């Protein structure tokens, strides 16, 4: 989504969002209205760091009694349809997945995800007993994956002329002016909280999980 010109990015609470796709509006709605439950489980991470993979693993583990592996919804549904993203799905009417998409209809433990930085999370997430699983990835691999995702996304929405060269994309990534960036500040925010509150935030590395 960073295929959109950088002029379409707007900075809020130290991080960049797209106002052209209403992502910032979704984040503001998420901050204002979301109320966490103590039983909630959140997957957090910068885009293209392995969050979709982690959604599959978390769903399979939490629902292993209700959904044996040979009858798992993961065989017929994308992980993003089973673990909703708060700012893109539940607080975005234009792109919401089919029912049940309302938070009150989701049984506990609710499995949810976000790309929002720790500092911008709603206070109820920070103060409740819910848990956060944060995944990070080698920044170079993240950059490459994010770049190719961006190119494909630009084609999908018919904006091939917006696609940047890998050199320009690298410069944006390096300067931190990228969707949900800066990358390093995003990672450090959750890393620090995992040290201060290890009972609250579990910090995972894509490479360790792969091994």
Image (cartoon, helix red, strand yellow):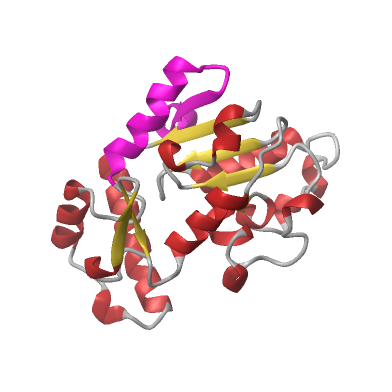
Compared with residue 144, is residue 132 higher up or lower down, i.e. above or below?
above
Picture quarter with the N terminus: bottom left
Q: Residue 184 at x, y = what percent?
A: 28, 37
Residue in front for this viewpoint, 44 or 193: 193
Q: Is residue 183 magenta?
A: yes
Residue in front for this viewpoint, 139 or 175: 175
Q: Is residue 99 left or right of residue 10?
A: right
Instruction: Give the tally of numbered discs.
Output: 0
Residue drawn at point x = 26 percent, y = 72 percent: 163
Residue in front for this viewpoint, 48 or 133: 133
Secondary structure mostly seen in the magenta stretch: helix
State the extent of the magenta-drawn residues as a range.
182-211
Q: Is residue 87 left or right of residue 56?
A: left
Q: Residue 152 at x, y = what percent?
A: 38, 69
Residue farthest along the front direction in this orientation = 32
Q: Residue 206 at x, y = what percent?
A: 43, 34
Residue drawn at point x = 71 percent, y = 30 percent: 38
Residue drawn at point x = 71 percent, y = 36 percent: 37
Residue in front for this viewpoint, 182 or 135: 182
Q: In the picture, residue 63 is in which quadrant? A: top right
Q: Residue 54 at x, y = what percent?
A: 56, 40
Q: Is residue 42 magenta?
A: no
């Amino acid at each position: 989504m960073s295929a959109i010109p950088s002029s379409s990015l707007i900075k809020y609470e130290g991080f960049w969002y797209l106002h052209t796709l209403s992502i910032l509006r979704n984040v503001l709605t998420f901050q204002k209205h979301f109320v966490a439950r103590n039983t909630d489980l959140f997957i957090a991470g910068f885009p293209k760091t392995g969050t979709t993979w982690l959604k599959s693993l978390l769903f399979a583990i939490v629902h292993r009694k209700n959904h044996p592996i040979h009858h798992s919804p993961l065989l017929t549904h994308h992980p993003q349809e089973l673990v909703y993203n708060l700012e893109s799905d539940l607080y975005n009417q234009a792109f919401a997945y089919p029912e049940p998409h309302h938070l009150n209809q989701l049984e506990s433990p609710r499995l949810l995800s976000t790309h929002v930085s720790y500092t911008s999370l709603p206070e109820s997430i920070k103060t409740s007993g819910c848990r956060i699983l944060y995944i990070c990835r080698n920044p170079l691999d993240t950059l490459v994956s994010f770049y190719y995702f961006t190119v494909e996304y630009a084609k999908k929405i018919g904006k091939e002329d917006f696609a940047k060269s890998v050199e320009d994309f690298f410069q944006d990534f390096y300067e931190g002016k990228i969707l949900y960036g800066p990358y390093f500040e995003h990672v450090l925010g959750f890393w620090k909280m995992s040290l201060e509150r290890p009972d609250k935030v579990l910090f995972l590395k894509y490479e360790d999980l792969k091994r």
